[in-house]
């Protein structure tokens, strides 16, 4: 099997197992920081494990080995007739690589354009400082949203109101916990591995985990009415830049559930401990390979026979020899 195809299949298997465990055991659980790092680690493991090879030594009996020389001094002409011309076969692998590269380039271009738009908004807007955070006042309907240490705030929103303070705290949580780093990492991964559907699912879950974490710091415990007020104050349907942390997302129902549900999670520690078992099993399944241990034991009986002269042999593959025959070519 082609090494690239084998790598992709192993990556798909690894990411599928890790995402499946997340959906079964960790989905909508309250340990959001744990889930955040689990999702990031799952993506990283899915890319790295297929490249690793952990040898497992297996003792085996010596097997007979036959060395066949395809090209000999007296066989060049006959062999050349059997080999097809390399340029006559179309390079489908090159065509596939061009298609995959083009799509990756489109995703890269979209990411760069998104970043340039934020820099453009930053350069044209009024700015203010809040500790180490730069607040940019803008008229963009998609605000408020954050990007690393920048907080884009909509000019018509009252930052001193109760809802405004909650939204401010929400966006500051994104900044302090460096959620933009997670987003940049995922966008770069999808540029190169966009063909893996599980990576898109990982990205979606990671982004909603960011919102759970920010809501947790912005809204009082079990205060669903405060959350609803905060959502309605910033309601917007305008798209935000790719790397931004927008306040309004489509996962309103899940966010409300996470705010109003109890913090007690049944079997939470068991589910987290099982993560180590799932990761170990994935390593054994994807990265481990079996290597034969060196065994220098010779066969009990060795027979030597005289073979006819090979001067008339046009191709060694046409020889009918007993299994395990060792051929010495002299001259």
Image (tube, rainbow, N blue to C red):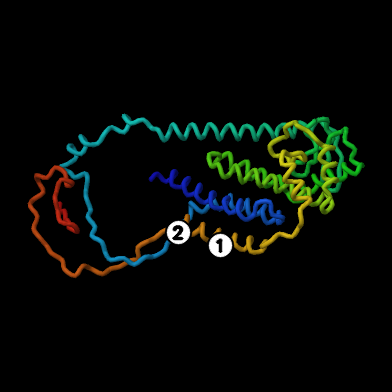
Q: Is tag 1's residue or tag 2's residue first in the polypeptide sequence?
A: 1
Residue 297 percent coordinates (x, y)? 26, 69
Residue 194 percent coordinates (x, y)? 56, 39
Residue 282 falls left or right of residue 241: left
- The answer to which of 71 and 243 lies nearer the viewer is 243
Q: Does dot 1 land on a helix, a strand or a loop?
A: helix
Q: Which residue is mark 2?
A: 288
Residue 47 visible in image: no
Where is residue 85, by image quadrant? top left
Q: Does dot 2 land on a helix, a strand or a loop?
A: strand
From this view, report whether residue 232 is shown above or below residue 293. Answer: above
At 64% from the left edge and 54% from the top edge, which residue is drawn? Answer: 26
Residue 159 percent coordinates (x, y)? 89, 40
At 74% from the left edge and 60% from the top edge, which residue is drawn? Answer: 264
From this view, report whether residue 229 is shown above or below residue 217. Answer: above
From this view, report whether residue 62 is shown above or below residue 215. Answer: below
User: Which mark, residue 131?
Assistant: none
Q: Which residue is mark 1?
A: 277
Q: Hey, which residue is sitting farthest right in the picture?
A: 160
Check disc 2: other Cα within 10 Å, few if <14, some if 14-19, many if 20+. Answer: some
Q: Marks 1 and 2: which is nearer the front?
A: 1
């Amino acid at each position: 099997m082609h090494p690239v195809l084998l790598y992709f299949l192993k990556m798909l298997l690894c990411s599928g197992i890790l995402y499946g465990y997340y959906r079964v055991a960790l989905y909508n659980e309250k340990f959001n920081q744990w889930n955040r790092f689990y999702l990031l680690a799952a993506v990283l493991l899915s890319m790295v494990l297929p490249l690793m090879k952990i040898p497992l030594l297996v003792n085996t009996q010596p097997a007979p080995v036959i060395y066949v020389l395809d090209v000999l001094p007296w066989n060049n002409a006959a062999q050349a007739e059997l080999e097809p011309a390399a340029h006559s076969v179309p390079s489908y692998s090159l065509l596939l690589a061009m298609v995959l590269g083009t799509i990756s380039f489109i995703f890269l271009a979209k990411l760069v354009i998104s970043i340039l738009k934020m820099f453009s908004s930053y350069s044209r807007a009024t700015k203010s400082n809040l500790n180490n955070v730069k607040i940019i006042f803008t008229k963009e309907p998609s605000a408020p949203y954050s990007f690393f240490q920048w907080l884009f705030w909509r000019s018509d929103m009252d930052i001193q109101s109760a809802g405004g303070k909650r939204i401010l705290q929400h966006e500051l949580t994104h900044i302090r916990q460096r959620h933009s780093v997670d987003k940049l990492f995922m966008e770069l991964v999808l540029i190169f591995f966009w063909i893996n559907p599980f990576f898109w699912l990982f990205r979606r879950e990671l982004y909603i985990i960011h919102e759970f974490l920010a809501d947790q710091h912005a809204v009082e415990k079990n205060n669903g009415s405060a959350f609803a007020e905060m959502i309605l104050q910033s309601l917007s349907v305008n798209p935000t830049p790719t790397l931004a942390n927008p306040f309004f997302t489509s996962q309103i129902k899940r966010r409300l559930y996470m705010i109003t549900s109890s913090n007690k999670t049944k079997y939470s520690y068991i589910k987290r401990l099982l993560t180590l078992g799932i990761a170990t099993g994935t390593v054994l399944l994807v990265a481990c390979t079996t290597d034969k241990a060196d065994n220098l034991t010779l066969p009990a009986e060795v027979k030597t026979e005289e073979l006819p002269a090979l001067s008339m042999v046009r191709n060694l593959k046409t020889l009918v020899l007993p299994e395990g025959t060792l051929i010495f070519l002299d001259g």
